[in-house]
Amino acid sequence: MVDVTVRGAGIFGLSIAWTCARRGAKVQVVDPVGPGAGSSGGLVGALAPHVPENWNAKKAFQFESIIMAERFWTQIEATGGVSAGYGRLGRIQPIPDQRTLNLARQRQITAAELWQGRAEWRVVETAEAGSWCPPSPTGYVIHDTLTARMHPRRACAALVAALSVMGVEVLTEVPDQGRVVHATGLAGLQELNEAFGKTIGNGVKGQAALLRFDAGAVPQLFADAVHIVPHADGTLAVGSTSERDYDDPTSTDSALDDVIDRAMRAVPVLHGAEVIERWAGVRPRSKSRAPMLGAHPLHQGQFIANGGFKIGFGMAPKVADVMADLILEDRDSIPDDFRPEASL
């Protein structure tokens, strides 16, 4: 007999399945299109925190999850033998003007308290940030040590491999058994929209590109609103757009050309790097903008984990933990802002 059925093999579904299996549950994962087939199969993998100010439950949850990530991904790699490309290497952000510089220095003070000494947010001169540091109009950058990177596709493959060792396979279709959690991304949000006759969540298209450029084990960059993420496999990802209106969810166009151009202008050393892949996908975003976790609004006695949007991979370790608490132990520690009621 199966204790838990997870519907959806994106980052939330696979992470919940992994955590439940590690706690001794017999788990099955069901996804008709396979693991990482939706927005979880992207390229960027920037596990970047919210700014350390105006602290709330969402920011605290994300902070705890990013702190948990190193142990989470290390255990997955050790079990399945496949690397997610995880590395907590930090992030550098050029500071464009005096107002932003003043704000960054204030955040350096609040980060010392809110990040509990477990990571730093520092304002430093570009020379101190090293040779990988991009040009900055003020001569200063933000360097934080909390941000991490991983490769989304490799992370999903690492979870699938680790789950297989635990006796859990991703199946295309089988009947529900045990407790059921729906981690079905955009399709799950559309089901809620139709049932309630209003927008509970929607999809936001993102476009990204992969360049052939081996930057080594250096911090990722956030410059001109573009994430620039060096991966462990010698590639580098740049992205992404945020498009609410789109005709084709998987096509790339001039919006991605602009992202690539901005990345190369911000980091001149990237000029001439070959673009080896262009990607587009639609990320599930709940009305509340926070992950939607807890009792499913439509399926009585079942659960939902949806709405990861841009921060799904960063939130995944903590999401998996609290959902396993709820599913296996009926222990509810989900923040009120994350409950489905916040979007209904």
Image: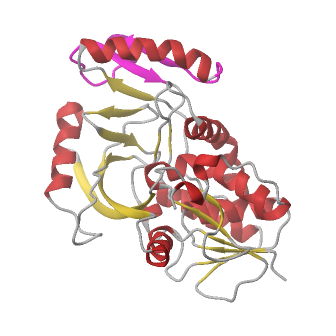
- Determine the residue positioned at 50% across, 47% down: 150
Magenta residues span 116-144
Residue placed at 41% from the left, 69% from the top?
A: 198
Q: In the image, what residue occupies the spot 48% across and 76% down?
A: 191
Q: How is the image coloured?
A: secondary structure
Residue 266, image x and y in percent? 22, 32
Is 144 placed above or below 174 here? above
Q: Is residue 251 left or right of residue 19?
A: left
Give the number of marks.
Answer: 0
Front-most of residues 319 and 221: 319
Residue 18 image point, x, y percent = 71, 62
> Is 142 part of what is drawn in magenta?
yes
Query: Which residue is depicted at the point 24% across and 68% down?
Result: 251
Looking at the image, residue 34 sits to the left or right of residue 251; the answer is right
Visible residue check, residue 85: no
Looking at the image, residue 157 sits to the left or right of residue 153; the answer is right
Quadrant of the drawing holding the N terminus: bottom right
Q: Is residue 286 above or below residue 31?
A: above
From where the camera sits, is residue 103 visible? yes
Is residue 67 inside the magenta stretch?
no
Front-lying residue, 283 or 122? 283
Residue 77 picture location, percent across and down: 66, 53
* Residue 263: % across, % down: 23, 39
